[in-house]
Image: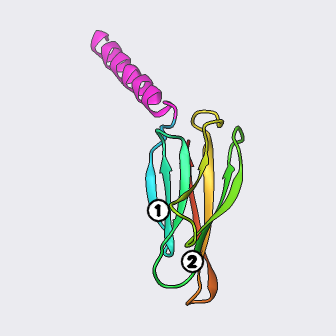
Amino acid sequence: MMKKLIKTAVVGIGVAAASLALAQPASAASFSWNVGDGVVTYDDGADSICARAYTGEGSRWVEVSLAPVNGGGPSYTWRDTTSTSGPTCRSLATAYEDTYYRATVRTYWGERGTIVPRGSKTFYS
């Protein structure tokens, strides 16, 4: 009887520990996302997201539409073009910590002559 009680207690403690580990707040992570005609980067330490169009062969742009999925932060839509010196960035410093964002990207390259949807990426700020 005592052995069964100890076994039940150990299993209960294990389940409780696993539940706590899985319930921790989401952690943000920096990333770099190649979107074909440029790159989108998020720097968690600086709370900024940037778009950078590649330079070289013709006119290009990278457009990012950014919106919080769960509220609590700013929304932006912006473009970086080949005529821009350096990346074009937006700050997420006013967003609540661990705001869940969706960045939707489309790009353009003059030699191709078309706008290409590049999909979406979600992340925590």
Position of residue 17 measured from the top left corner of the image (x, y, whole percent): 40, 24
Position of residue 60 measured from the top left corner of the image (x, y, whole percent): 57, 77
Dot 2: few (<14), some (14–19), or many (≥20) neighbours within 10 Å?
many
In screen coordinates, is 14 left or right of 47?
left
Q: Nearer the viewer, residue 70 or 113?
A: 113
Q: Earlier in the sequence, mark 2 or mark 1?
A: 1
Which of pointers 2 and 1 indicates the residue nearer the eye?
A: 2
In screen coordinates, is 124 left or right of 29?
right
Dot 2 corresponds to which residue? 60
- Whole-number angstrom distance, CA of label 2 to CA of label 1: 17 Å
Decide whether residue 18 is among the magenta residues: yes
Please give the count of numbered marks on the rendered protein. Answer: 2
Q: Nearer the viewer, residue 87 or 104?
A: 87
Tell me the quadrant of the picture where the N terminus can be found. top left
Q: Is residue 12 above or below residue 103?
A: above
Decide whether residue 105 is among the magenta residues: no
Magenta stretch: helix, strand or loop mostly: helix
Tell me the quadrant of the picture where the C terminus can be found. top right
| Residue type for callout 2 | Arg
Dot 1 corresponds to which residue? 33
Position of residue 12 measured from the top left corner of the image (x, y, whole percent): 41, 21
Q: Which residues are magenta?
A: 1-25
| Residue type for callout 1 | Trp
